[in-house]
Every structure is written in structure tokens, then in C-alpha cells.
Image (tube, rainbow, N blue to C red):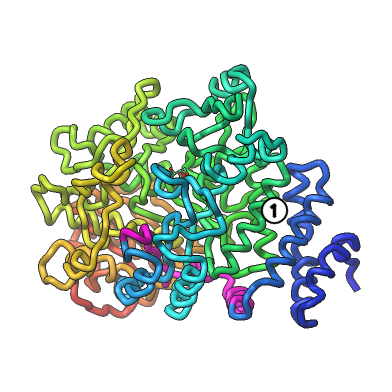
Amino acid sequence: MQPRVTPVTVLDAVRPVLARLPAHRRTTFELRLERWWPDLSAGVAAVHADALDVATRLAVIAAEGFAARPDELHVLDERRLLEPDRLQRPEQLGYACYTERFGGDLAGVGERLDYLAELGVTYLHLMPLLQPRDGDNDGGYAVADYRRVRPDLGTMDDLAALAGRLRERGMSLVVDLVLNHVAREHPWAVAARAGDERHRAYFHVFPDRTVPDAFERTVPEVFPDFAPGSFTADPDLDGWVWTTFNSWQWDLDWSNPDVLAEFAEIVLLLANAGVEVLRLDAIAFLWKRLGTTCQNEPEVHALTQALRTVARLAAPAVAFKAEAIVGPRDLVAYLGTGEHAGRVSDLAYHNTLMVQVWSMLAARDTRLARHALAALPDTPSTATWITYVRCHDDIGWAIDDADAAAVGLSGPAHRAFLSDWYAGDFPGSWSEGLVFQHNPATGDRRISGTAASLAGLGAGRRDADGAFARLFLAHAIVAAWGGIPVIWSGDELALPNDPYWAAEPGHGADNRWAHRPRVTDVDRAGRLRSGSDAARAFAGLAHLARVRASLPQLHGSVTPQVLLDTDDGLLVLVRRHPSGALVAVYNVTAEARPLSLPRLEHLLPGAPSSVLHDALSGHGVTAGADGIVHVPPYAAWWVVRGPAQVSPDIR
Ligand code: GLC
């Protein structure tokens, strides 16, 4: 017999909650507690002195969530525990959209699943759908009630029904967990404003500017343009409250155990509605420490570990996805490193890859990307990336000055070039992005725009073939990096920027709405009109998903190796999987670029009778007498060895 890990006092606390369950369920929970108690108590102990009390409280919340979990979700838990690598498999394809902009409401989304299935989608991220504040609410990221769905979209029951329909189609429902802040109208904030001390302690409130001024010396502004600073004076509070984002998004004080317990309940409420992946919004900002940027503090990972363990106890089918748009050096910690390995998020946005894709296309040069991507630490084997060409947010040029310097570039100058290029202000630019949040203090200019408009398919398009090639190339790079590639709604139809983005109340100052277009049935029908932009884009992306699903080499457990010594127009990545190797070859320029065939053959060893071919087009990879392969402009090849199988090149 092994010694018991779970303290007796904890068992005494959870057993009454479990008492009404059948014996096998009680056994399951106690086995899980035995397995995960060390993670729960360690996560809590890193932030709270009274760790045993707080962790016990969380274990009881987990037991309550477990007891309330519907039977079919217990079955889902069993299923998911049998496929621990599910999120890493190459069959995964994500799609992200606003419910109302894609299907009207939750029921409307449910009626459009055939369309998503045609694209190959297995993972559907519906943007914030819980009750937000009235008026501007940052696209739903200012939540006023976590227990209620926005009434125009449906109810919690509708959400659970949609999750069920998705499960039947092999699709996982992903929703946001906004945990850095709540709306000023959330009941906790309302109580704080009414003078309730318990709730005032949910927030960072200061009587005057002394402490805010001290923090602002090192805390960068997120929305310098429409919400400058990180603190807001609130007359009801008679003080200053921390507001990293907009003045009506109040940051929570995560050093307060009540906040942790509240969110443990919310996690399980969403889990029990059938949500399979929780997107931890703005997770990097959770912990504040004077003298720092107040991002990526170690306590963020401890808190994630505590919440993650609560989910593991009650609803192990649930995965966590970190939304930490941070520099490349800080990113990997969100997937679990050091003491948090295997204990935090299963997924994190690969912001660095996204930025490097656009940087390579504008610069027609891969030196910086090769250096920066090769310098990234290996991904923990239990976790994987969300890869994306762009999302609902703007693109911030997260390029490390040291990476830039290593390849002879100036970080600030390159970032300025990228902003100019994607705003269409640089001579020769094909892009039609919009400048978002120009910060005169730092010179930063972020960029909004749909993938099509950024790639050159906007209103002023000059070279549609080149633009389509860039669009396909960008998606091919993210589809074969490893992880779940997520398509932002409308990009599969090559929709350009929405010209009417500013017309909606509250949207006028936030041009991110330009790249969050409504996708109607008429837009979707465009994919059936042969030769249309929509048909070209949709066929290309669906083809990528199909080929990807057939290639075990693209399993997310493999970290790609970036070849550093290639032609500067090429990005060449080697993926070594037990089932064989794959070499991805991308030409980011509009001219043919050279690659050595003997080198490719060396990277892809195999029987002499087998041939090298590009799995995307089915074409063989051949060279002239000099052994040089001329990689065509904007080529995206996934080279494997095997019997040649020619499939039509549908691009
Ligand atoms: C995340 C969201 C962004 C939002 C912010 C504040 O970064 O992606 O859209 O503005 O969090 O919630």
C-alpha cells in the first residue's frame, strides 16, 4: 500500500459532498484527488499562506462540480482521458468567430455545422458570449455575469445544447474565461462601489495616485490611444482602481483567495455546460508586482495550476488555453516549464510565429524568423500551440530587439517598417491594414486587418495571384508548425476589411472591428461560385486541413527544427516523427529560390526506390543536373518521402 497523499481533513471535507453519488463515482473522485492533490496544494501554496485551507476549499468546489456534472460529460471525461494527445493530432483544425457574426445566435451556429465540417473544423472558439456590460464592452471582454449567456445569443441551456451537437460532430467547444478583469457593472464591482469591504478587496483600489504612479513607471499601456494609463479614478470608490484595459474593465486582485474560489466555480459551471477548452483571456496580467511590467509573474503560473487542477478533479475533459501575447522568451512558460511542467495550460497562442510570418512576407527575407524561431525553447511534450495567421485582435510586432540585432537589424526600425508596410504606407506594399493604437511615447503602431487585406486582396488589389499565394503560404506555415491551426472567421472566404466597421455604436474608436466581419450565408455560398475569391480561399484552406490530417509527421509533439543555413528567401523546417520525417519548404519571395536536392534527400532518408514529393500538390521534387531545386515564388511544400501520388494541385 502506498501512503495516502490526500490529507484526511480534505477527505473529510469532500466526502459529504460526494455522499449522494454512486460508489464508483466516489471512487473516481477520490482517486483523482489522490493523484492531483499535490498539484493543487503546490499551486495554492505559491500564492497563499493559508494553503491548506484554500486548497481544501477548492477541493470542495471541485467535488461539487463533479457531483453536478451530467452523465454524458462523465463519459466524455473517460473518452478524453483515453486520448491524452488529442489536441496534438494533425486532424485538429480550429475556427474562431463571434456567435452573432457567424450564425446570429447559438442555435444559428448549430445549424451551420455542415459548413464547418466541410472546412475540416474540429475545434470551435466562440468569442465572449457571457452577459457583458451594456454599451461598449470590448467585444464581450467586460463580463457582467459569468452565469448567464448574452440573452440575444441564447441561454446556458442553448450553450449546453450546442456543445452537445458539436461533440456529436467531433468538434470541441471553446469559450473565453475572462479572469483578469470584470465589468464595472459586475455584481462584485457594484458591491465594492456600494462600500462593501469584502468586495472592495476583490480589486486593486488605492486611495490616491501614490501607488498607481509607482506602478506606472514600469507598466506598459495596453490601449494608449483610447484608454491611456492603467488606473481609473472612480468616484463611488473614492479612489483609483486598476484598469489594465478600458476604464470599465476592473482588474481583479488574484492575491485574494475569494477571487480564486469564485473562478474555480465559474470554470466548473462552464465545464458542466459542455465547454471543452477554456481560453484564459489576458492571463499574463493576473499578478502585479511593483517595479515590473506586471506581466508573466511566476504567480500567474501557480494560479493557473490551481485552477487547472480543479478542472482535472471534476472535469478532466477540459483543456486550458493561455492567451498570453508576450515576447518569445516568456511564452513557453505558459505551456508549463520547470515546476509547472504538465500542470498549467495545454495550449497557448504562438504569437511569435504569427508575427514572423507577416515579417517574412513583408521583408521577403527569412533571416530574422529563422533566428527567432530556432531560438525558442522546445515545447513541453504534453502541450502544444495554437497557431494562427491572425485573430480578432490587432497584430503587435512582438520582435525581440536581441533577435533583430543578431541578424543585423534594429528592432525599432524593423517594427516601424512592418507597421508602414502593413498600413500600406511603404513603397511597393500590397497591404491594406489599419494602424491601431499608435503610441507616440514608444513609436509602436499595431495593425488591424483581415488576412486577405493584409496579404494584398483588399480593395486596391493589384496582383491577385500573388496575394492568394501569400494567403495560402501563410496558412500553410501555421498549419504545419505543430499545434492547432485556428482560422479566423471570414479568412476562409478571403473576406477583406469590413468598410463599415466604425458604424456600430461603440466601435468607432476600435478598428479591430474592421477585421471581425460578419459572415453571412451569402458570403458562405460564395465558396460554391467557381473562380470567386471565396471559392479559391475555401478550397485552399480545406485542402490544407485534409492533407494535414493525413500526415502523422505533423503531430504536435514534434518540435520543428529550423534550418539556419538556407537561402535567405526560404524557411525550411524539419519535422522528425517516428513515422517518418517531413521537410516544410516555404519561399517567402516572389522569385524562385535555390535549395540543394542532396540535402533534402539527406534530411528525408528512405528506400532508394521511393521519391520525394510535396504532399500538398502531389508533385515530385526534382532538381537540374547541378542538384539545385528551384523553389518557385511563394511555394509552400510539405516534402515527404514515399511512393509518388499525384493529386491535382487545387490552388
Ligand atoms: C485579450 C483579448 C482582447 C481584449 C483583452 C482584454 O487580449 O483578446 O480582445 O481586448 O484581452 O480583455
**Residue found 28% across the figure and 35% down from its top:** 435
Looking at the rendering, the stretch of residues picked out in magenta corresponds to 73-101
- Give yes or no for residue 529 being in the magenta stretch: no
Which one is in front, 127 or 120?
A: 127
**What is the quadrant of the C terminus in the image?**
bottom left
Which residue is labeled 1 in the image? 306
> Which amino acid type corresponds to the residue marked 1 in the rendered image?
Ala
Which quadrant of the figure shows ligand 1? top left
Residue 97 location, quadrant: bottom left
Instruction: Evaluate whether residue 359 shows in this view.
Output: no
Which one is in front, 634 or 474?
A: 474
Q: Is residue 301 left or right of residue 647?
A: right
- Give yes or no for residue 96 being in the magenta stretch: yes
Residue 546 location, quadrant: bottom left
- Residue 445 place in picture, x, y as percent: 32, 31
Residue 437 vertical position relative to residue 338 in the rendered view, above or below: above
Q: Secondary structure at mark 1?
A: helix
Crowd around label 1: few <14 · some 14–19 · many ≥20 (10 Å): many
Q: Residue furthest top?
A: 210
Q: State how many labels appear.
A: 1
Q: Is residue 70 left or right of residue 92?
A: right
**Residue found 57% across the figure and 75% down from its top:** 83
**Residue found 34% across the figure and 60% down from its top:** 100
- Residue 578 place in picture, x, y as percent: 50, 71
**Residue found 79% across the figure and 72% down from its top:** 18
Q: Is mark 1 within 8 Å of ligand 1?
A: no
